[in-house]
Image (cartoon, rainbow, N blue to C red):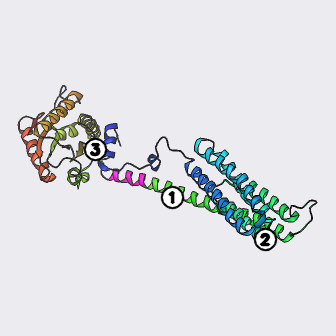
Amino acid sequence: MTTHPARSEAADTHAGLAATDPASDLGSDADPLLPRRLRIAQLLIGVGAVDVLAILVDWLLLGDHFGLALALRLAVVPPIVIAGLLLYRFGRNTRAAVVATALAIMGLVIVGTVIGQFASEPQSSRYVMATLFVLFGAALSASLPWRTTHWMTVSTALVVATIVVTGLNAPPHVGNLDLAVFSVVAAAGALLLRRRKDRQLAQIIDLRVRDSTHASELRRANRDLSLLSCTDPLTGAFNRRYLEGFLDRLTGSIAPYAGYGVLMIDIDRFKLLNDRCGHLYGDDCLRQIAATLQQGLRGSDDVLVRYGGEEFAVVLPEADLLETLVVGERLRAMVAEQRIAHPGLGPDCYVSVSIGAYSASLSEDLVEALRCADRALYEAKRGGRDRVAA
């Protein structure tokens, strides 16, 4: 099928078939790291909040050791949280904020475990269980990358197990092996669940990407099929089917008080050309004239339709009769300038077109407007051809 740039633009404009690219919704300044950066900031704030709330628990349970616990709570986690938030706010390197978040979680868990050693049983064991719960939840969180989660969880679990076993005694003595083993097992279980979660999430994302790709391909296929169904394969112009419902689309796209112009265009003595030169020459003539008419339109809002064998129709939105006549005369002159030979009329004769023009209001039926333009075309034929009549 012969195509032209103006024709392609008109096809997308009138048919409304242009594919939508989801990526176009993102501005050029969109930060692809923004979702992760936000999650990191939220996690940092959460760690800081837990550390502050834990001070109340320390005050209720530790008694004489509360001063030491308060010093540890304020000396370790808050500075790391503040540094991480500053990196989040002013730094472009997300990696530094991620490391700060991991260190804050490690600090919260290790400090809690150390403080628990100064509590009496069963509070001491509950401190350890609470800190392991924090580590377990942080490992399952998707806010931190897998590698960061891996080294953070393993390192913290080993430190917690060491503290639990030694009891911070000098020289150390081995005890609480059950809690130490539980710490390691809990950390390993958290990492396994996180890995499984990441794989499932990756599969879901992959499926969504495939679905999105298939949907885009389907939209493009539907666009192409819709375009083919309303396009004349020989000339690349719209066919008569496209005119069905066109007036409804036109009504919604122009001012309510505006009308539209209609041109009916017929190639003069085309049957004689076909009989004398053959259908291949006639087809080539149709293609050349269709391309010329398309180039002569005002813009992509105008519609060129192959209405019959050698007949074309043009719809001109928001055009009064004077503008319709001006466009019609321009199209007639452009076809004449092509100097397409018409051997059926003689050696120095060329193909011409006759044009009928009509201006209609939006309340008028398009079919009736085409009939009126067709009657004007008949007057142009009767007046000698190669002219425009209204």
Give the Cα distance between marks 1 and 2. 50 Å
Q: Is residue 242 left or right of residue 188?
A: left
Nearer the N terminus, badge 1 or badge 3? 1
Residue 15: % across, % down: 31, 50
Q: Is residue 121 left or right of residue 383?
A: right
Nearer the N terminus, badge 1 or badge 2? 2
Residue 16: % across, % down: 32, 50
Residue receiving disc 1:
211
Asked whether the viewer can see residue 244, the reply is: no
Instruction: Please report the residue visible at 44 percent of the width from the left and 56 percent of the height from the top.
Output: 218
Q: Which residues are the magenta region?
A: 219-230
Residue receiving disc 2:
125
SS label for mark 3: loop
* Magenta-colored stretch includes residue 220: yes
Which label belongs to residue 10?
none
Give the Cα distance between marks 2 and 3. 82 Å
C-beta proximity under 8 Å, tags 1 and 2: no
Main secondary structure of the magenta stretch = helix
* Magenta-colored stretch includes residue 232: no
In terms of image quadrants, where is residue 300? top left
Q: Residues within 10 Å of mark 3 (few under 14, many from 20)?
A: many
Q: What amino acid is found at the position of numbered circle 3 in the picture?
A: Ala
Residue receiving disc 3:
237
Q: Residue furthest right?
A: 171
Instruction: Please report the residue visible at 62 percent of the width from the left and 45 percent of the height from the top.
Output: 86
The vertical placement of 303 against 145, above or below, is above
Q: Give the quadrant of the N terminus.
A: top left
Q: Residue furthest front?
A: 64
**Can you tell which of label 1 and label 3 is closer to the viewer?**
1
